[in-house]
Image: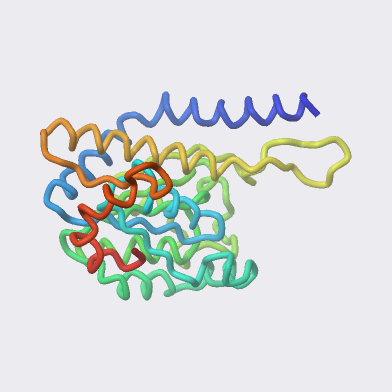
Amino acid sequence: MSELADEYFDAVTGLMARIRSEEGDAVAAAARILAEQIGRDRLVHVYGPGGHSNLASQEVFFRAGGLMHISAILDEGTLLSSGALRSMAVERLPGYGRIVIERAGIGSGDVLLLVNAYGINAALIDAALTARERGATVIGASSRTHADQTAADHPARHPSGANLHDVVDVHIDTKVPVGDAVIQVPGALERSGATSTFANAYTLNWLMLETLALLAATGEEVPMWRSGNAPGGDEANARFLSRFADRVAWL
């Protein structure tokens, strides 16, 4: 059993090491966009259309040590809590992402961060295209390898066949391998040990840290969440809640 633990640990940490060594420029570019937006007291919208990709949008929303200007789009359509098979069907539904972005009111002057493990599904691409049509700046985080190696006629794909990295202003490659899972357990039918949640969480938290560093360097106070379970957490958060309660839809 320890061999499996070591193999999985090496795979996950190796993936994060690749992101760290290869995506610095992209993360820096994205952080500048986020810092400029937050510096203007504007929200940064985060959407992860896809079953487990929704976890990425939740990872940096209402999170201890997180930025209060992060506003997650937690649309029920692709949440696993609405039904796993339903989630997969909705993320493959052309036009659905457009509805979500229009309903969220994303438009000119907004920043949208889209996160998806594979970077191909119809809801994701529609969300990106619609946001850009409406004048928003769009940042994407997804696996270029997975997208490029997925067949053009795969049923999950947007009708245009576009990949997320082709249709955003800035793209961060999360390096998730094809199929996501990386460990072949002897005797098992399929590989196991998924990596995308680790890749997404590391990438987004790194992006938030770089954004915070830019904001903190200005000397201005940056509204941040403290854990409500930590001493003084509720009091610390209450200082800023009035600024966001009516602006962040899922707060």
User: Closer to the camera, 147 or 28?
Assistant: 28
Q: Residue at x 58, y 61 (%)?
A: 153
Label tally: 0
* Residue 49 locus on image (x, y percent): 46, 61
Q: Residue at x 41, y 27 (%)?
A: 22
Which color scheme does this rendered protein use? rainbow
Q: Is residue 130 left or right of residue 176?
A: left
Q: Residue at x 74, y 42 (%)?
A: 191
Extreme-front residue of the structure: 231
* Residue 183 locus on image (x, y percent): 72, 36
Q: Quadrant of residue 125?
A: bottom left
From what the image shows, is residue 204 above or below residue 68?
A: above
From what the image shows, is residue 42 above or below residue 6?
A: below
* Residue 231 locus on image (x, y percent): 37, 42
* Residue 116 locus on image (x, y percent): 47, 52
Q: Quadrant of residue 208?
A: top left
Q: Is residue 152 visible?
A: yes
From what the image shows, is residue 14 above or below residue 242?
A: above
User: Closer to the camera, 219 or 7?
Assistant: 219
Q: Is residue 133 visible?
A: no
User: Closer to the camera, 135 or 103?
Assistant: 103
Q: Is residue 3 left or right of residue 97?
A: right
Extreme-right residue of the structure: 187
Instruction: State the quadrant of the C terminus.
Output: bottom left
Instruction: State the quadrant of the N terminus.
Output: top right
Q: Residue at x 33, y 69 (%)?
A: 101
Q: Is residue 213 left or right of residue 77?
A: left
